[in-house]
Amino acid sequence: MSTITVTKTYLTGVALTETDLDNMKNSIETFLNTTKISDDNLQNASITASDKLVNLSVSEGKLAASAVTTTKIADANVTAVKLASDSVITAKIAANAVTAGKLADGSVDTTARFVDGIITSGKLASDSVTTAKIVDASVTQAKRSALVHGTASKSSGTLSTSTDYAAVTITTSSRPVLVTVTATVLFLSGATTSVEVLGSLAVTRTGTVLKTIATTCVDTILFGITFIDPSPGTGSVTYAIRAITAATVLTGTIALTVVEL
């Protein structure tokens, strides 16, 4: 511990002068400015206010381990650069604190991050489920949308080359359409035999010929023809039977059935 000793001896009757006092003061100033007060000169808890410290005088080396507690840190002052790598662990993140904006694009990179069964229909973007995403044989009949279909028929009367008969109108979604035509006992106008002539008929889609029926049946055998219209388009379309050459349905029925696949 640094000490200062100022000794002055006076003879009896000698007065204490101003110079004597100045000399004592100078000795004290020299001690304080040159020798300085050491740690041993300070009593415990003798520095009672922050104004005793010169600004910026407390350096890192002056801080004891674990000296900076939460209350010593001003709010919003721990910035990203103050955090060591891997220092923010799960326990330090509040529940529901990680929002979508905190996730970088492509940062969730494995299916292991998802709990089974949490991806609902609302989470899927339009057209996100491609063929490759569907397990083979997993699309059952119940998973398909309701079939768009229709049936119409004509019994007796003259088939015209300008009028649609047995017409069926459906609203398609561009999927292929299965078309089936059945008929019994068709005769040419004025015929008197039991020979059935179907070669003069056509199946049309909104006026466009899709298929001509060039088959002759005998007696009352049920005639049937089925084909697929691969590109019906989207929206309302009309399938119909139309004559290529005039004929008469004397007995029996001609029927048309269409089903979107």
Image (cartoon, helix red, strand yellow):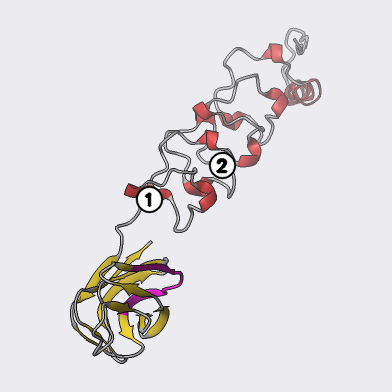
Q: Is residue 46 magenta?
A: no
Residue pushed farthest front?
193
Which residues, given as a range, are shown in magenta?
A: 224-240
Q: Is residue 173 left or right of residue 14?
A: left
Residue under numbered circle 1: 122
Q: Nearer the viewer, mark 1 or mark 2?
A: 1
Distance (Cα) linking label 1 and label 2: 19 Å
Measured from the top left, where is residue 209 in percent x and y? Answer: 41, 83
Task: Give SS at disc 2.
Answer: loop
Instruction: Tell me the quarter of the picture where residue 40 sits.
Output: top right
Q: Amino acid at mark 1?
A: Gly
Q: Residue at x 48, y 36 (%)?
A: 114
Disc 1 crowd rating (10 Å Cα; few below 14, some 14-19, many 20+) is: few
Task: Give whichever of 128, 77 is nearer the camera.
Answer: 128
Task: Give whichever of 111, 223 is nearer the camera.
Answer: 223
Q: Amino acid at mark 2?
A: Val
Tell me: residue 151, above or below residue 238.
above
Measured from the top left, where is residue 69 in percent x and y? Answer: 54, 25
Measured from the top left, where is residue 229 in percent x and y? Answer: 43, 71
